[in-house]
Amino acid sequence: MKRPTFLRTAVVAVATTLALVGCTGTSGTNGSGGGGTAANGLIDYLDYGDFGGGTAPQANFNPYLEATRLGGVDYVFEKLMVYDKFSCTAKPWLATGFKWNDPKTLTFTLRDGVKWNDGKPFSSKDVAFTFDLLKKNDALDTQGIWRYLAAVETPDAKTVTIKFKDPGASTFTLLTEIYVVPEHVWSQQSDPVKFVNAQNPVGTGPMKIKSFNPQQLTIERNPDYWQADKVKVQEIRFHKADAGGAVEQLKLSRGEYDTNAMFVPDIKKAFVDRNPDTNHYWYPPGGSISAYMNLTKAPFDDLAFRKAMTTAFDRDQIITKAQLGYVKAASQTGLVVPGQEKWLPQGLADEGRLGFDAAKTDSALTAAGYPKDAQGKRLGKDGKQVKFTFKVPGSYTDWVSAAQIIVQNLKALGFDVALETPNPPTYESDRAVGRYDMLFGVHGGSCNMFRNFSEPLGSDQSAPIGKKAASNFVRWNDPATDQLLDELRLATDEAKQKEAVAGLAKIMTDQVPMIPLWYGAKWFQYQTDKAVGWPDEQNPYAAPGDNVLVLTNLKPAGS
Amino acid sequence: MRYFLRRAGFFLATLWAAITLNFLIPRLQPGDPAEAIVSRLGGQSQAIDPAQVEAVRKMLGSPDGNLLTQYGDYLAAIVRGDFGISYTYFPYTVTHMIGQGLPWTLILVGVTQIVSFVVGTLLGAWAAYRRNSRVDSVITLGSTFVGTLPFFWLALVLIYVFAITLNWFPSGGGYGGGSNPGWTWLFFSDAFQHSILPAVSLLIVGPIGWIIGMRNNMVQTLGEDYARLARAKGLPRRRIALTYGARIAVLPNVTGFAIALGGILGGTVLVESIFNYPGLGRMMLEAVSNRDYPLMQALFLFITVGVLIANFLADLLYGVLDPRVRREEAV
């Protein structure tokens, strides 16, 4: 009787192994709970989600290498001003204020008493050095700032004067968004483009890098920070994640993250309902996702046709079915409301949102010379059925379901539409060279109003069909638009800027260069068992990605 | 001798073809590495910033240019063993990145492949030895059933039960955030715990192919005339099974094993993605989606050369083991 003995041995062996492993357990990983408030009134630590850097992150704290740096840089380096990206208001940061001496000269006054985290004082020399660094190494100039600048000068240690080639108001957000680095460290580097800054990166920010391995990045409070009294978190631990994966969702619902930013299907059931008192989410709107029509082709080159099409799409169905109700319908103006509502033109119904009205589209199309024949086919001006394709990247599943709804809407109107699902690179290159009839495009959503409108609409961003357009993929070439964009680019005062933006918003509604459908959501989940003060719908003091703004508003729970 | 020379010549020709295709295929595909990297940063619902694409393109240097000069540079670099700088992990080199991932993949997949092969072959032999018994049907039906389950589903069930519900093992990663890679006991025990779930999932599906292959081969060899003769001569059943059946039936499995070892990298993508394991499979997936040509090419070259060498060795081994192969070629 050999078998039973063998079986018994095997069972015992397996059980022992499991017990051993079970005892040591997952001590290496984090669990929920633990880490309450320490005696000094600080939160011991918070668990955050991914820190970037791909599947095998390598130490890289060079803030300009946006594509490969790790997430912690946002807490180590600071900018002259910090934008609350929800309402797009600039807050004084390393600079306490600014002044336009003339449309081509901008002066920043720097904050007193700021120190680098190695103890050396921060001064205007560092700011000038930073700008020169970007000039000498254009690969680091990710905002493309030196296309606009003439010179950066430092009259004294607390003043920085920026001179532009042309009036520079439209580039204000770009230059305040640049991370300032210390001259005494970076001037020692022979090749700043390949500098990974891995050992104790020196910055002015609220946190310092404490430890890093490819599974976890830990940053700790900088006690000498210029507003250290506002930072109530001793330590933040970022955890390597397979972003958006099923396992990450399980970890989130188990409470392993104090905050995370990921897509979760049915967030209410998967996360909030687990503990409605502490588990919350807030998904403010980002850029608009629009139906792009190839304006060089009939019938899309016909304004009456495009106007009729604005009510052809069932946005509510796209939002509830394809987008799980996480976002809202987009305004035809191209602006992101409610955050940017102060830019809306006067007297616009429902913030420029257009509803779904197939009957209205039908009669408008007929009136515009696109009648239906006896079989219900929609005829073009050549008397043949209107036939075109709608392209969507096959792997963007939520976009595919949105496209299916759109195709349904179009077929109901009598069009002969085919859905094509290429892979994303093909999709992107087809869109860029204009090889399409209709597809989705993304635009706007940043705090730079000039970019929000010039990128999708400026004729300098366009190109002939067959050539790659920079960002004007619909090929909108309109002198009136370019004129307004020019006004917006040059305007230094807000009233003038608002006038130009309102003009552009009016072009969006009257000329319909594209049809905004829904807003991309900014994912943001958080728990309030350890920390409170996260931004939310009632108190939208920042957008989810505004890391330092959020950090300086967090407080221990129950305080 | 002629047989071996021919095999060697064939090996070199395929190697050259593989290297050349490896150079060409990524370049014939649409897409721009700079745009792929920037759009990965923003996600699908965010407008791509042209200035940033421009900066990333400058950072990476220009991958476009004359295809022929690129090919020349590429061959010269391979000879030097220089695979360039990875786009995804700029400014780290491809060699550095492969060095990071290789040990994980080699240990996890290497060990499970060997164990799967040994266990699978033994089980298959056992099933064939006790053909048509309960043991046989349990092994054959069981492995056929498990073989139909999708691997990712199986892996997710394991994670759900043992990591999320019971909390016995970590749900992913190669090691915890608290331990640093190095020659320490803490790190090794941590890495061991992290490897259990992926290893178990591989061990559940790994032996199936070997079981079925071995069982069928051996059932066939046991039906051959020489086995019948041995039985007629009254040799013990066990001896017939081992020396007349298993020894011969295992040959195709050995070739298969050599090829499987060569293809370790390709087969590890799924398991490493699900368990977030820091090996080369996941890195390969990422390299492809980012159009990271240098990293992609180096990894594909690894796979191709691995499979080719394994094939070559298997060919040579066959020539040694089975004289008929050599004779047929020489005629």
Image (cartoon, coloured by chain):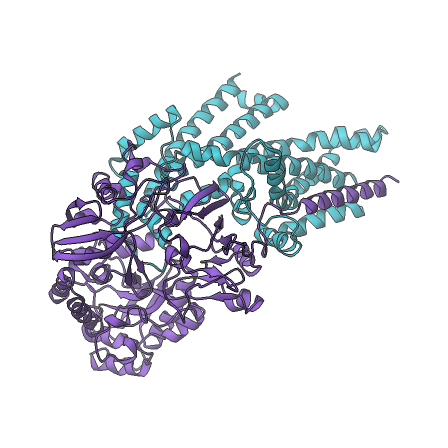
Chain colours: A purple, B cyan
Question: Above or below — where is B219 with respect to A328?
Answer: above
Q: Quadrant of residue A445?
A: bottom left
Question: Foreground residue, A416 or A84?
Answer: A84
Instruction: State whether residue A359 is above or below residue A142.
Output: below
**Horizontally, is A307 left or right of B270 in the view?**
left
Q: How many marks?
A: 0
Identity of the residue furthest to the top in this view: B1
Q: Is residue A404 visible?
A: yes
Measured as percent of width and height from the top left, residue A33 is found at 59, 57
Q: Percent position (x, y) of residue B7? A: 50, 24
Q: Compared to A382, does A452 lie above or below?
A: above
Judging depth in this view, the residue of A138 and B186 nearest the camera is B186
Q: Is residue B132 visible?
A: no
> Left or right of B327: which side holds A221?
left
Position of A14 relative to A80 (above/below): above
Residue B210 relative to residue A255: left or right: right
| Of A298 and A444, the residue lying toward us | A444
* Closer to the camera in the image, B331 or B92: B92
* Coordinates of residue A488 in the picture (x, y in percent): 16, 63
Question: In the picture, which quadrant includes the N terminus of chain A?
Answer: top right
Residue A549: where, in percent of width, then height? 37, 58
The image quadrant of residue B71 is top left
Q: Quadrant of residue A16?
A: top right
